[in-house]
Amino acid sequence: MGPLAPNEIISENTNFLLAFFIGIAFGWVLESSGFSSSRKLAGIFYGYDTVVLKVFFTAALTAMLGLLFMSLFGWIDLDLVYINPTYLTSAIAGGVVMGVGFIMGGFCPGTSFCGAAIGKIDAMVFIGGLFIGVYGFAFTYGWWEKLYLARYLGEPKISDKLGISDGLFGLLMILAALGMFVVAEWAEKTFAREEY
Amino acid sequence: MKQLKLLALIIIPLGIIIAAMPADKVKQSRLTPDELLQEAGAGVQFISPDVVADMLVQKDPSLRLIDVRTPEEFENYSLPGAINVPLSNLLSDEYTDKLNQDAYMNVFYSNGSVYANQAWMITRQLGYENNFVMEGGLNYWFGNILSPVTPSQTSPDEEFARYDFRKSAAAALGGGGVISSDAASPVSKAVKPPVTAKAKKKPSGGC
């Protein structure tokens, strides 16, 4: 049956419409859980607030379990689900740039729009920087092309590389995430701050 | 901490369930249009009537002929041992276990190749394997296997080998050029005389 759009069960336009509503819901949930505060977001780097880690890992686990079970029930064909191709060098470089930008700006791209939506000036400045970065990269693409396309790995899955089933990797992922949550809770107590 | 325990209580059992499932159950494969186009373009689905005839004569148990014509046409004449899966009912549930399997080599046939090829396309798109199409269909079968044309004097040796094979196959399969369409049921049981001239020509292709 699924995925809906590649199997042409819904049209490309309906797909965009659904994405629009899901996007609104996503933004609303982000904002209402405090993700429009750059101090809260930056907390992950200092340990006093780890809500970012908890929220995004919970989201990843939910999506992972949902996809695996839907595939098990024959509701979705995981082979048709788009996987972002991996270019190892640019993934590492991008991760570093993203991390530095995150701690410096106090936002990640999605949450900056959340902040801007409720009128935060720092978030708007962040978005400005984001566009400078996007256009800067696009116009100087020639300089980066080699780095950008280096060490192409296709669409690898960690479970394939380890030679274990997707389900078993899912279980390991759950245990790892729960372990991280425990550490995160400990960090929040240890590095607690009164007001932020 | 309480929330964390609750979360753990929910997701760990789910993780254990999904980890305990066999890997291939967690996956169902379908062909993308691109892959299908590539396979169809390469013609991997076609199997020559000579190979089918040889398998029939040898009574190869792995062969399963599937007639995709209408039930009336099937009643009228069918190849020995064939089952009828009309193209219009191809997707009905009663045939799924016959089409999606790995025990037999299914060979679709129709009067020509078109309907059989359509059946192959549809089943292949669904990710089914072990389905093939008899090239040329029944028209070719009648014109060449059951009533082979004597090659001219100057023909290469393979032509004669093929002719000999076809002649013996036709004899074994109740052909010999005197096929009338009412001779349907005797024909399908006429696999009896093992006059099998032990196929001179090795079948080419196949699975």
Image (cartoon, coloured by chain):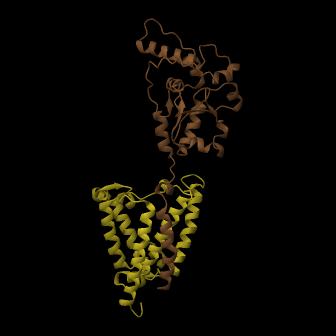
Q: Nearer the viewer, residue A14 or B156?
A: B156
Question: Can you give x and y, in whole percent of width and height, for residue B136 in the image?
Answer: 55, 25
Q: Nearer the viewer, residue A65 or B203?
A: B203
Q: Is residue B165 left or right of residue B81?
A: left
Quadrant including the C terminus of chain A: bottom left
- A153 w.r.t. A51: above or below: above
Quadrant including the N terminus of chain A: bottom right
Residue at 46% x, 64% y: name it. Answer: B19
In this rendering, does residue A118 appear at all? no
Taking the view exactly as shown, the residue that stands out farthest to the bottom is A194
- B117 w.r.t. A22: above or below: above
Which of the 4 image quarters holds residue B69?
Answer: top right
Question: Can you give x and y, in whole percent of width and height, for residue A149 in the image?
Answer: 31, 56
Question: Can you give x and y, in whole percent of width and height, for residue B167 in the image?
Answer: 53, 14
The image shows a total of numbered marks equal to 0
Question: Can you give x and y, in whole percent of width and height, for residue B160 in the image?
Answer: 45, 12
Residue at 48% x, 81% y: name it. Answer: B5
Q: Which chain did the image draw in brown?
A: B
- A153 w.r.t. A122: above or below: above
Residue at 53% x, 59% y: name it. Answer: A72
- B164 w.r.t. B1: above or below: above
The tint of chain A in the picture is yellow
In this rendering, does residue B206 appear at all? yes
Q: Nearer the viewer, residue B133 or A165?
A: A165
Which of the 4 image quarters holds residue A193?
Answer: bottom left
